[in-house]
Amino acid sequence: MKIRTTLLCLTLVTVLTGCEELGIPDAKKEAARKEAEGEAIGSACRQSGRALEDCYARNPKASKAAIFSGWRSMNDYMTENNIPTIAPADEAPHEPPAGEAGHDAAPAAGEGH
């Protein structure tokens, strides 16, 4: 009987140590992951020179408190180390698609009257 109890306990310990592999959600880990993601978004926004409000608008699902925390910590770090902002690549001026350019543009030479 004692052997059965020992084997049962060992089996339970072995099975329960793999709970993370089963995909059972952990609210604390999920909250920590979202907090870290929000801080990363905020610090990236600060490094790229985006305003805090723009960062909130671009990332509506992220926690505003986490974004602010990341933005503030990156601001302090950049100020202490004299790091300049880096303009994001997607901020290049966009030209309107070919179909939309003709509405406001003047007619080309040789066209028209």
Image: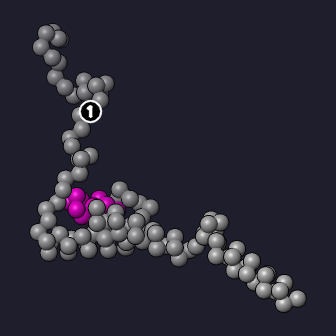
In the displayed structure, would residue 8 be above or below residue 104?
Answer: below
In the displayed structure, would residue 85 be above or below residue 100?
Answer: below
Q: Choose top left, top right, bottom left or bottom right for residue 69.
A: bottom left
Tag 1 residue: 96
Q: Nearer the viewer, residue 49 or 79?
A: 79
Write the residue at 17% across / 11% down.
Answer: 111
Q: Given the current orientation, which residue lies at the most extreme front position?
A: 3
Q: Nearer the viewer, residue 17 or 3?
A: 3
Quarter of the image with the N terminus in it: bottom right
Q: Choose top left, top right, bottom left or bottom right for residue 14.
A: bottom right
Q: With 49 as the anchor, is 62 left or right in this view?
A: right
In the displayed structure, would residue 4 be above or below residue 88?
Answer: below
Q: Is residue 20 visible?
A: yes
Q: With 61 as the anchor, is 90 left or right in this view?
A: left
Near mark 1 (Cα within 10 A), the count class, few <14, some 14-19 or many ≥20, is few
Q: Which of 100 and 71 is in front in this view?
A: 71
**Magenta stretch bounds:** 45-56
Q: With 111 as the anchor, is 12 left or right in this view?
A: right
Label 1 element class: loop
Q: Disc count in the image?
A: 1
Quarter of the image with the C terminus in it: top left
Q: Given the current orientation, which residue lies at the most extreme bottom position?
A: 2
Prevailing SS of the magenta stretch = helix
Write the residue at 83% across / 86% down.
Answer: 3
Question: Picture coordinates of residue 60 (x, y %)?
Answer: 41, 60
Q: Can residue 103 be seen in this view?
A: no
Residue 78 colored in magenta in the image: no
Write the residue at 29% across / 59% down.
Answer: 54
Write the residue at 52% across / 73% down.
Answer: 29
Q: What residue type is labelled 1?
A: Pro
Q: Choose top left, top right, bottom left or bottom right for residue 103.
A: top left
Question: Picture coordinates of residue 84 (x, y %)?
Answer: 13, 62
